[in-house]
Image (tube, helix red, strand yellow):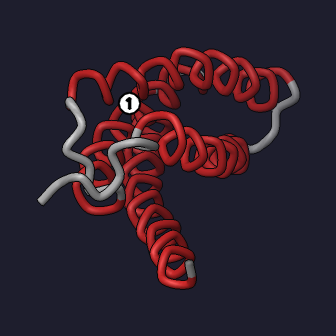
């Protein structure tokens, strides 16, 4: 039992580190698009989010959850998560950044923190729940 708890804590910290690297990808992409394109908040956010999702999914499947689960099925489950998260976070971001005129970077960081929390739980229990540590 104690060993399993330690394993889960390590898994959480791995997820956190890979999510931080995905956050750097997302923030870097967002900054480039936000500063150079002249676009509104939402297209910059969406493009940056997609780039970070691909990065994060790839690393976490292999190293955090060590899953041998069917990759297309796992990707469809992650797509289902983002089918809900993306419109909600995009609308929230648009409202905060473009309507209420909050700083775009603060809004993006808030969305990233919300994403981190909900995505860990979703991936841990829904996407990889039954296939954790199944890869050799």
Quadrant in the rendering for residue 119? top right
Q: Is residue 95 left or right of residue 71?
A: right
Residue, disc 1: 50
- Comparing 25 with 78, the one in front is 78
Residue 98 image offset from top left, x and y in percent: 75, 23
- Comparing 47 with 119, the one in front is 119
Residue 21 image offset from top left, x and y in percent: 38, 62
User: Which residue is depicted at the point 71% across and 42% down?
Assistant: 107
Q: Quadrant of the N terminus?
A: bottom right
Residue 110 image offset from top left, x and y in percent: 72, 47
Q: As displayed, is residue 43 above or below residue 1? A: above
User: Which residue is depicted at the point 45% across and 57% down?
Assistant: 19
Q: As displayed, is residue 97 above or below residue 128? A: above
User: Which residue is depicted at the point 48% across and 25% down?
Assistant: 46
> From this viewpoint, which residue is outermost toward the left?
136
User: Which residue is depicted at the point 76% across and 25% down?
Assistant: 92
- The reply to whether residue 105 is visible in this rendering is no
């Amino acid at each position: 039992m104690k060993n399993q708890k330690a394993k889960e804590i390590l898994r959480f910290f791995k997820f956190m580190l890979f999510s931080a690297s995905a956050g750097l990808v997302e923030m870097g992409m967002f900054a480039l698009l936000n500063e150079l394109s002249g676009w509104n908040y939402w297209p910059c956010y969406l493009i940056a989010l997609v780039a970070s999702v691909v990065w994060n999914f790839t690393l976490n499947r292999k190293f955090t959850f060590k899953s041998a689960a069917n990759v297309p099925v796992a990707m469809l489950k992650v797509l289902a998560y983002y089918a809900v998260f993306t419109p909600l976070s995009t609308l929230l971001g648009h409202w905060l950044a473009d309507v209420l005129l909050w700083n775009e970077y603060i809004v993006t960081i808030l969305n990233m923190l919300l994403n981190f929390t909900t995505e860990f739980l979703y991936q841990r229990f829904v996407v990889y729940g039954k296939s954790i540590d199944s890869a050799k």
